[in-house]
Amino acid sequence: MPADSSARDSANRSDAAFPAAAVDPGGRETLGGADHAAVLQINADDTVRHANTNMLRMLGADNLDALKGTSYRSLAPLPWAKPTIKRLVAKARTENRPQEITYPVVDPATELTVFWRIAAYPRKSGTVHLLIEDVTQFQRLRETFERFVSREVILRMVDLSERDFFTAARREITVLFADLRDFTSYSAGHDPARVQALLRDFFSMSIPLLKRSGGTIDKIIGDQVMALFGAPVESEVHALNALCAARELVREHRALMRQWKRNGMANPLGMGVGIATGEAVVGPIGSAQFANYTAVGHTVNIAARLCAKAEAGEVLVTRAVAVASSAQRAFAAPAGAPTADADADAVANPGHPPRYKEIGPIDVKGLDEKVEVLSPVWDDD
């Protein structure tokens, strides 16, 4: 893809001018897989050992034989980045560790920014593997979703490149709300710094936990956090993941309450959780100037209603959550298995299934029928 003059000028500046860690492949050498990356294997004497099909295409070479034995320095897969490629290869050898850089390049034909990742991986006896890949899709997904999901989920989204995560869709998901009891009274009676510290404690506990559990942080509203399970990446265990997350939230919040008590808080604030499973519209919702990835529909309203109804330390769920999570246990990994955060269909250890207390039906605005409500109880807690 052609680069404009600013990109060529940028390539002649030092590597320090660019964000060397702008793209983190999360332990993988490529973000889009080997099929999408151009790879050049360089011998210790700088001659070409091998080039994959993508690299041959970038170089305009008909076959590998035309390149073997020639100096990689004479090649220009990205002409404007030629000096940087040489520096990365040399640095990978001298420091014996991977080197990488990411270039934002404006295509004058489309006026769109394309992000190129260039990486050099040292191998044995001075051999280096040079990798070049277009990571525009990753950058776009990261800019949109990094506030909401873990890095592992973004990498999985890149793997699902055929999916359009920027178009709204209707699908079955599970929605979880959690918030503090009596927070309004607390915030009215305490100075802003204490209110801020309390919320920081709560969200520092809950947000990472929900992300680890496969949840997408939809939004924070006052003292309330909303998380989606099964979006943006679909999951066959979204209800089970949400239920397991709720169990851990209750456990961790008990520990947080003990901490607040030790720090002099006379009546530590409890937490309520509401969970609902069902169809919702998910996607970026908003205007051209401001949009958030979110979910809308009755399922969201029901989960919010259950959270508002829950007592301190209580989790309320719909019957659909209980039924779906029970069926989804067939997909769970055995107890003690390692967690695979990158896999939205993995549950490391769901523990023993809960028993459920019947709470009774409740009215939800916009629904003609009442919603059956249950409260999961874990006997081993």
Image (spheres, rainbow, N blue to C red):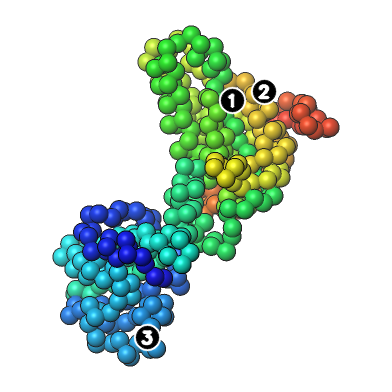
Query: Residue, x 70% and y 33% (percent of image)?
Result: 302
Q: Secondary structure at mark 2?
A: helix
Label 1 and label 2: CA atoms lie apart by 8 Å
Query: Residue, x 80% and y 33% (percent of image)?
Result: 367
Between discs 1 and 2, the one toward the N terminus? 1
Q: Secondary structure at mark 1?
A: strand
Q: Amino acid at mark 1?
A: Gly
Q: Amino acid at mark 2?
A: Lys
Residue 349, above or below 246? below
Where residue 228 sits in the image (x, y, percent)? 59, 41
**Relative depth, front residue between 376 and 26:** 26
Between discs 1 and 3, the one toward the N terminus? 3
**Relative depth, front residue between 19 and 108:** 108
**CB-based contact (under 8 Å), mark 1 and mark 2:** yes
Q: Which residue is mark 2?
A: 309
Q: Is residue 66 left or right of residue 268?
A: left
Q: Amino acid at mark 3?
A: Ala
Q: Is residue 271 left or right of residue 36?
A: right
Where residue 291 sits in the image (x, y, percent)? 56, 42
Q: Which residue is mark 3?
A: 61
Query: Residue, x 60% and y 29% (percent of image)?
Result: 273
- Quadrant of residue 317 in the image? top right
- Does any portion of residue 362 appear in the rendered image? yes
Q: Which residue is mark 1?
A: 272
Q: Secondary structure at mark 3?
A: loop
**Relative depth, front residue between 375 and 230:** 230
